[in-house]
Image (tube, coloured by chain):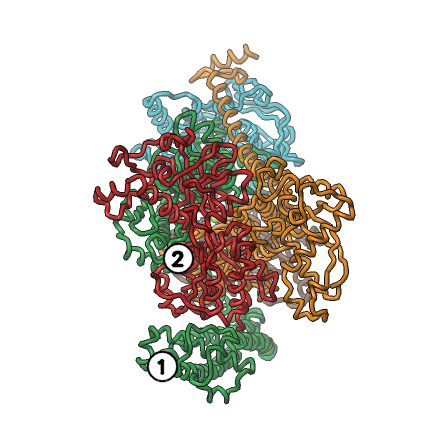
Chain colours: A green, B cyan, C brown, D orange, E red
Amino acid sequence: MTPSVLVLSVLGLAIVGYFLGRQRALQAAARDGVKLHSLPGYYGQSVALFTAVPAFFLLGAWLFLQPIAIESSISGKIPDSAIADAGARSLIMVDVRRIAKGVSLLIEQGDVTENELSDMSAEVTNVRAQLATVGVALGSDVSPVVFEAAKEYRSIELSGDFVRNIAVFLVALGFGFWAWARVQPRMRARNISETFVLALLMGSSMVAILTTVGIVGSLLFESVAFFKLYPAEDFFLSTTWNPQFRGGSDLGFLPLLWGTFYVSFVALALAVPIGLMIALYLAEYAGTTLRGFAKPAIEMLAGIPTIVYGLFALITVGPFLRDWIAQPLGLGTSSSSVMTAGLVMGVMLIPFISSLSDDIINAVPQAMRDGSYGLGATKSETIRRVILPAALPGIVGAFLLAASRAIGETMIVVMGAGAAAQLGLNPFEAMTTVTVKIVSQLTGDTEFASPETLVAFALGLTLFVFTLCLNILALYIVRKYREQYE
Amino acid sequence: MNIMSEAATELAVNAQTEQPEIKMRGKDVCVFYGEKQALFDVNLDIRKNAVTALIGPSGCGKSTFLRCLNRMNDTIDICRVSGEITLEDENIYAPMIDVVELRARVGMVFQKPNPFPKSIYENVVYGPRIHGQVRSRAEMDEVVERSLIKAGLFNEVKDRLHEAGTGLSGGQQQRLCIARAIAVSPEVILMDEPCSALDPIATAKVEELIDELRVNYTIVIVTHSMQQAARVSQRTAMFHLGKLVDEGPTDKMFTNPDSKITQDYITGRFG
Amino acid sequence: MNIMSEAATELAVNAQTEQPEIKMRGKDVCVFYGEKQALFDVNLDIRKNAVTALIGPSGCGKSTFLRCLNRMNDTIDICRVSGEITLEDENIYAPMIDVVELRARVGMVFQKPNPFPKSIYENVVYGPRIHGQVRSRAEMDEVVERSLIKAGLFNEVKDRLHEAGTGLSGGQQQRLCIARAIAVSPEVILMDEPCSALDPIATAKVEELIDELRVNYTIVIVTHSMQQAARVSQRTAMFHLGKLVDEGPTDKMFTNPDSKITQDYITGRFG
Amino acid sequence: MTDLTAETSASASHKQNRSLFEVGERTRKRHASERRFRRLGLAAVIFGILALVGLMASILSNGLSSFQQTYVAIDVFLDPAKLDKNGNRDPADIQKITTFTINPLIQAALKKTMEDRGIEADGVNAKKAFEMISKEAPADVRRYVLADPGEIGKTVSFELLANGRIDGYYKGRVTMDSAALDRNVSPEQLLLADKLKQAGILQSRFNWSFLTAPDASDTRPEAAGLGVAILGSAYMMLIVLVLALPIGVAASIYLEEFAPRNRWTDLIEVNISNLAAVPSIVFGILGLAIFINFVGLPQSAPVVGGLVLTLMTLPTIIIATRAALKAVPPSIRDAALGIGASKMQAIFHHVLPLAAPGILTGTIIGLAQALGETAPLLLIGMVAFVREYPGAPPEGFFDPASALPVQVYNWTQRGDPAFVERASGAIIVLLVFLLLMNAIAVLLRRRFERRW
Amino acid sequence: AVARDQIQIAGSSTVLPYASIVAEAFGENTSFSTPVVESGGSGAGRKKLCEGVGENTIDIANSSSRIKQSDIDLCAANGVTEIQEVRIGYDGIVFASDINGASFAFTPADWYNALAAKVVKDGALVDNTAKTWADVNPDLPAQDILAFIPGTKHGTREVFDVKVLEAGCEATGAEEAFKAAGDEKAKGCTALRTDGISVDIDGDYTETLARIDANKNAIGVFGLSFYENNTDKLQVATMSGINPSTETIASGEYPVSRPLYFYVKNAHLDVIPGLQDYIEFFVSDEIAGPDGPLAAYGLVSDPELAKTQEMVKNRTPMGMLN
Ligand SMILES: Nc1ncnc2c1ncn2[C@@H]1O[C@H](COP(=O)(O)OP(=O)(O)OP(=O)(O)O)[C@@H](O)[C@H]1O
Ligand SMILES: Nc1ncnc2c1ncn2[C@@H]1O[C@H](COP(=O)(O)OP(=O)(O)OP(=O)(O)O)[C@@H](O)[C@H]1O
Ligand SMILES: [Mg+2]
Ligand SMILES: [Mg+2]
C-alpha cells in the first residue's frame, strides 16, 4: 500500500468516523433527553479529526524517519572497499535507493518475480540495462555489493512499509474509537474542532515564515560559497562592477545599489505625485461615473506584463528622451538611461500608489473634513493640510509597496536603463540595478561555480536584508504615526 | 455650577427686555435628502449675542437645520435646500455667495471632538492661516494664546502647545475645537451636541465656556439634554419630525411651553 | 403611551411586594482597560422578569458593566475583569464556563441596529441554527414567525422575509435585532441604548416591546434618557465615575433617591 | 442691501464685516489655487488613462495582425512511390517517412497548380516558389498521411501555411524594398505571391491555430502558436488559485482575528511585507532549490511553476485580505457573538462573506502579477521550447509546459521579425486572460455585494 | 513511476534556436515526443546537468562554450561520471550597422583602438579619446563611435574579448606595453572605456537590433544567423577584409567565431526514450550537414562532423579537459 493509498483510506475511515460520531451524539441526546452541547456535525468532526490527524502525524514522521533509519543501517554494511573507487558513500547510497526503487518497478511490471530477484546477482545480470527499461537511470554499472545492499534496502523498506501501514491504521482506528466512545452530549465538540481549525489557520500564517526561511536558506548556501571565492569587503565596498570570463572580476556591490536607488527614485518621483493626485482627485472630486471607470482603468496599468513596458522604454521613450532632452542639453547620447527606465517604471507604479492611497484617503474620517470645511477651508486646502497629513502613515505604506516593486523590477530596467553598472549622477546615462544583475549573472554563460555566477546569490541575499530593513523601518513609522485619528 | 446657570437665566431675561437684534434668520427652510424631506418650512430667528438651543427627539432635523446655517450641508451630495437663510440680511444660499467666507463667519463645533492630527498650536492657527488673518509668527502666537485663553484651555496646555492635539482628553479636545473655531473670529458659532461625548466634569467646563462666549458671539447649540438646554441657552427651539414646533425664551419653554408636544417632550413622555 | 408606562410602574410595585428572585448578581466587580480602572467594586442584583435600567453620565461604566454580564468584554484584549458575576448562582467567569453557551442564555442588543447583511429570515434563524435548536424547515419557519411576532415586527415584514434585513428602517432593524436575540430563547436580554439611534415613533414601539418581553425575560437596559428609564424599568441603577452610587425601584429613584449625586443627575444638575 | 450691511457692520462690536457678496482678493486667489489643484488632479487621471491607452494602442497595433494568417491552398498528390515504397501500407514503415521525403511532393504540387492555372513565375524557380510555403507544411502532410495511410495514392487538397515573409507582405511588414535587401525573400517571390493571391491560391483568414498550435522553432514563425502556453498558464493559475487563496485567507484570518499582538506576529507581519519586496527571480531560486532539487518534482512542470507563483502571490493576497477583514464593521462581529456564535462561527459565517469583495480584489491583483511573471519560471525550466501539450490534470500538472509570458519573452528574443508580431499577439491574449479574470471577479463581487 | 517520455534539454540561449529546430524536426519525424528545450544560460544548464542522475534532472546541456573543470568536478561529485561532448558547429559573430548608414571594413585593431580604455599612442599607454571611427582609422567613415557589444553574461563576449580585443591589442602593440607596465597577463587588453561609447547589452540580439534602430549610427555585435534573418535592416561589416558567411567561417578565413556544444549525460541514454536517437539525429548530415536546416539558419557546419557522428554512435564519454 503506497502512502497515497494509505492517506486515502485513513480519510475514508475519518469520513466513516464522522457519521458514526454524529449519530452517536444524536442517539445519546435522544436517549438521555439532554441537549447537545454543540451541533451534531461537530461531534462527527471531532471523531473524524481524531481518526485522521494523529494517523497523519504518525505517517508523516514515519515517512521522514524510515529512510534515515534504513540508510544508516545499510550504509554501515557497505564495506569501505566498495566505496573507495566509486566516490563518496552518500553517492553509493543514492544508487542503492535508486536500484531498490527500480527493482520494485521491475516487479510491479512483472518483468521479474520476487524469487528471481533473490537469485539475481549483479555479476550475472546486467542490472543497469534492466533497470533502464523501466526508466531508472544509473550513473555506472552496478557492483555486487551495491546490488546486495539495494536488495536488502528494499526488503527492509518493504517490511518497514508493512509495519507502517499497520501502525497508521491502528492509530487511526484507536484514536477514532476513543473519540467515538467519548462522544456524549456534554462534550464540547465544537471547541475541539475549532481548536483544530485555529491550528490550521496558524499553520497557514507560518507559510510566510517558511518561505522566508526557504529563501534565506537557498541563497545562503551559495552566498557562502561566493564569499569563499571572493572577498566580502570587495563585494560590499568596491565601486566597480566588471565581471570577466576568465576570473579577476571586480564585483562591487555599490554601483548596483546606487543604480537601484537612482532608478527607483526616478520612478517614485513620477509615480508618487501622479498616483497621489489621481487618488485625491478620485476620492475627493470625481463623480461616481468617472471614478467607476478611471479606477479600474488605471489599475489595468499594473496588470500589463512588464516586458511590454520594457519594449515601450526601449523603442519609444528612450530615443525620445535622447533626442529631445539629453542631446539638446548636452547630457549624453545614450537612449537607455536611468531616466528612461525610471519614467516608464513610474507609469507602471502609478496604480500601486493611486489605488492604495485612494482606499486610505477614503478611510480618513469625515469628521476631519467637516472640521476643516467648518473653518472655511476650501477643498484643496482641506486636502493638503488635513487629509494628506492624516493619511500619511497609510500613504507611506503604499509608497513602500511601490518602492518594493521598483527595487524588484527587472525587464523595464534591462531594456530601459541598460546593463552598465556605474556610479554616476547624470540621469541620462545608462545604469543598472541589483535585480537585473541577479538575473543576468544567473542566466549567463559563465560557469556556475565561479564567483561571477555565485555573486547572484550574494546580491539576492544582500537585497533581501536591505528590503527587510526597509520594511522594519516602515512598520516602525506606521506604528508610530498610526491611530492619530480614530 | 448651579449658581452659574442661574446667572445665565437672569442674563437671558435681561436680553429679552432689550430690543432683540437678529443675527441669522431662516425663512421657509425645507431640506431634502434625495427624495426624503428632512425639514419642513422652518422659520427661525437667531438672536445676536445669545445662545439658542435646538432640542427635539432624535432624527427630528436639528443637525440638519444647524448645518444649513453655514452650508455644511453642501458637502452632502444628495442634500437640497430651499427657502432662504440670511446672515445679517444677506441670503447665504444666494448663487454669488462665497461659502468659504461664510464659513469663516459662521464657525462650527461638532459632536465628536475632531482635532486635526497635528499639534495643538497648528490646530488653532489653521483657520487664521488659511484665511490670511495672520502673517507673522508673532501674530500667530498671539492668536493661539488668545483663542486658547478664550476657550479656557490655555493654562492646561501652554506647556505643550507643540504636542499632538489628539493626545488631549475628550473634554480638552472639544475645547480645543472651540478654540480652533474662535481663532478665525467668527460671528456665529454652531455647536452640534458638543458635550455628548464628554464626561460630566468636562461637560460642565464646556458649558461654562459657552456661557462666557455668548458675550462676543452668537451661539446656536443642538443638545439632547433638556437640562443642558435649560442651563446654557437663552432661547430654545423645539423640532419634531422635521418641523419647528415651538420657539421662545428658554425659561418660558421649560415652564410653560405653547405646544403640547414640547410639554410632553420636556416632561419625558417621549424621546 | 402614558397609559402603558403607568401600567408598568404599577406592575413594578407589585413585583416588589413579592419575594424577589435574583437572576444575575454582580459581586465586587472591577473592570480594568489596560491600566485604567473603569469599574470599581460594583455589587448589583438583577431581578428575574424585571427590567433593570442602568443610568449615569457618559463614560461612567454602564456599557462596561452590561458587557460583563455576557462576557462580551472578552473580545477586548486589554480588558480584565475581577470579582464575580453569577447567572443563577453559577459564576460566569469561572474557568470551565463556555462563553458561547453563556451568550446563548444572555443575549445582547446593541446601540446601533446591526442586522446581518442577509435576509430577515436568515437573521432570525441564525442563532437557533448554530445552537442546534432547529432542525427542520418547519421548525425554522416556526421560530422565525414566533420571534418576529414577539418582537412586534411580523406583520410589517411577513411579506418580505427573504429580503435583506439591512433594507428595513432603523426602528425595524432594531426590532429585528431584538427578534434575533429572542430567537435563541435567552433568559436575559442586555440592551445598550437600544433606542438612541431611533426616532420617537420607533422608540415608542421598542419601549412597548421591552415592556411586553419582561413577562418572559429578564432585561437589563442602558439608557441616557431619564424619561426612558422611568417609562420602561422597574429597577434603576445609577453609575457615576465607575461606581454604582445608587440602586432601587425606579419610582423611588426618580422621586426620592438616596444619594445626592443621583438626585443632581436626575434633576439635570449635570450630565 | 448694501446699506443694511453697512449699518450692521458699523454696529458690529469686534470687527467690521464685509458683505458675503464681495469676494476679497485673497479669497479669489484661494479659489484660483483650488481650481489649479483640481485641474492638476484631473490631469493626473488623464495622464494615467492616456498611458494605458497608449500602451494598449501599441500592443494592439502590433499584435492584432497575428490573428490573421496567409495560407496556400493546393492539391498534393500523395505519391505511393515515395510514401510507401513497399506498397503494403504498413504503419510501421510509413512511420519512417520523413518530412524530407515529403518536400518534393509539395514542391511538385505547387508547380502543378501554377501550371494548371497558367501562372507565370518570372524569375522564380520551382525551389524558390516552394520556399514560399512554410517549413511546417511537410509536417502537416506527414501527420495527415500517418493518421490515414489509406489516403496514400490519392490527391488531397491541403491548406498549407505560407512562409512568414509572404505572410508579412500582406501585413505590411515586408515590402518590395525590404525584400530586395532580404536574403530570405525576393521581390519576384512577392510578385508571384500577388499572382497566387489573385488566383485564389493564396488566402488570408482568421488564425485559430495561433491560439491552439504549439510553439514552433525559429525557422517557422508562421506556425508558432500559444496552445501549450495557454494550457500551461491556465494550469498554473489554477494551482495558484487553489493554493494561494485558501492559505492566504487562512493566514490573514489568523493574523487579523486571532493572533495576539506581540513580537512574534510583528515578525510575521514584517516578513509578509518583505516577501512582497523580494525580486521574483529569487522565488525562482527558491523553487529550484526546494521543489525540484529537494522534493524531486520534475523540471518545466506547471506544478512547480504554480507552487513558486503561489509563494510569490501569497503576500499580496494576505495584505489585501487583511485590509478587507479590517474593513468589516466590528458591529457585525458583536452581533454574532452577542447571540452566542463562537468567534470562529462569527468569522466564517459573517465576516468572511463581507470581506469577500476585498479578498477577490487582492486575489485578482495577485493572479495578474503571477500571470505576467517570467523571471521565476526561468530557473525552474519553464522558459522553454515546448511543443507537446501537457496532459489533462492532474497528471498534466507534471508534464512540461510553457506559459504565456514565457512565450512573449521567447518570441521577443528570436531573430525572425515575424516573431515580434507574435509576441504582441501573445500579449493581447495575456491581457484578454487578465480581463476575463477581472470580469469574473467583478461578477463575483457583485454577487457578494448585493448581500450587504 | 515510468520514465518521462520527453527529453529535457537546458542551457545556452545561443544554442537554443538550433536545438529547437532539431527538436521540432525530431518530434516531427519520429514517434518520440518533441524534446523540451529550456533556455537559461550555459552556466545554469551545465549546473543542472551535473545536479545528479535521475528523472528530475536534465539529459542534455547546451553550451556556447566548453565545459569547465569545475563543472566536471561537480558532476563527478553528484555521480554524473560519463558525459559526452558534442560539438554541433560554429557560431559566426558579425559586426553590423544600420542598412542605410555607412559601410565598414574593420580589423581587430580598429575595434581595440575604438573601445579599449587605454591605447598606445606614440609608444605610450594613454587614455582613449577617439570620438569617431575616422579618429581610429582614417579609412573608416567619420561617424561617432557607438558600439553595442554583448554584456559580460554572454559567452559571445568572451569570443569578442579573445578574437577581437586581444587580437587588436596584440596588433597595436598595446599588449607589450601592458606587459611592460607590469600587467603580466595583459588584462588591460579587455578593459573597455566607460564613457558610454561601448554599451554592454545584457539582453539578446533583438535588443541590440532595437537599439540600432534607435541609434542609427551605432554598430552592434550579432550572431550570424540573426543577421541573416534581418538582412533588410542590417548591413554587415568585413573583418580583416573577409565578409562573414557560413563558407568563410567554415574555412576559418573569418576570424570571429566559436564552437557550440551540447553535453549528454550517458547515464540517461537508454533510460529516456529517444535520447540516443535524438543526438544521432542532431549530428546527422541531414540536419547538421552543410545543406541541412541548421546551416540554412546560419549555423556553420562542423567540418569534422563525421568524427562527431562516430563518437556519438560509440557513446564515447569525454576525456580530461586539455
Ligand atoms: N446624509 C443624510 N442622508 C440621508 N438622510 C439623512 C442624512 N442626514 C440626515 N438624514 C435624515 O434626515 C433626518 C434628520 O436628521 P438629523 O441628523 O438632522 O436629525 P437630528 O435631529 O440631528 O438627530 P440626532 O439627534 O440623532 O442627531 C433624519 O430622518 C435622518 O435620517
Ligand atoms: N475598549 C476600551 N478601551 C479602553 N477604555 C475603554 C474602552 N471602552 C470603554 N473604556 C473606558 O471605560 C470607561 C467606561 O466606559 P463605558 O463605555 O462603559 O461608559 P458608558 O457609561 O457606557 O458611557 P456612554 O454613555 O458614553 O456609552 C470610560 O472611561 C471609557 O473611556
Ligand atoms: Mg444630530
Ligand atoms: Mg455606553
Check contact, mark 2 vs mark 1: CB within 8 A. no
Residue B37 found in image quarter: top right
The residue carrying mark 2 is E66
Kind of residue sitting beneath label 2: Arg
Per the image, label 2 sits on a secondary structure element best described as loop
- In the rendered image, the vertical position of residue A17 relative to residue D140, given as above or below: below
Point out which mark residue C243 bears: none
Of residues A115 and B119, the one nearer the viewer is A115
From the viewer's perspective, is C136 left or right of E167? right
Label 2 marks a residue whose chain is: E
Instruction: Say if disc 2 is inside 8 Å of ligand 2.
Output: no
Instruction: Say if disc 1 is inside 8 Å of ligand 2.
Output: no
Q: Residue C8's x, y, as percent?
A: 59, 53
From the viewer's perspective, is E188 left or right of C54? left
Of residues E217 and C271, the one nearer the viewer is E217
Is any atom of residue D432 visible in this view? yes
Write the residue at 48% across / 60% down. Answer: E305
Write the residue at 55% across / 48% down. Answer: D411
Q: Residues within 10 Å of mark 1 (few under 14, many from 20)?
A: few
The residue carrying mark 1 is A73
Q: Quadrant of the C terminus of chain A?
A: top left
From the viewer's perspective, is C255 left or right of B61? left
Label 1 marks a residue whose chain is: A
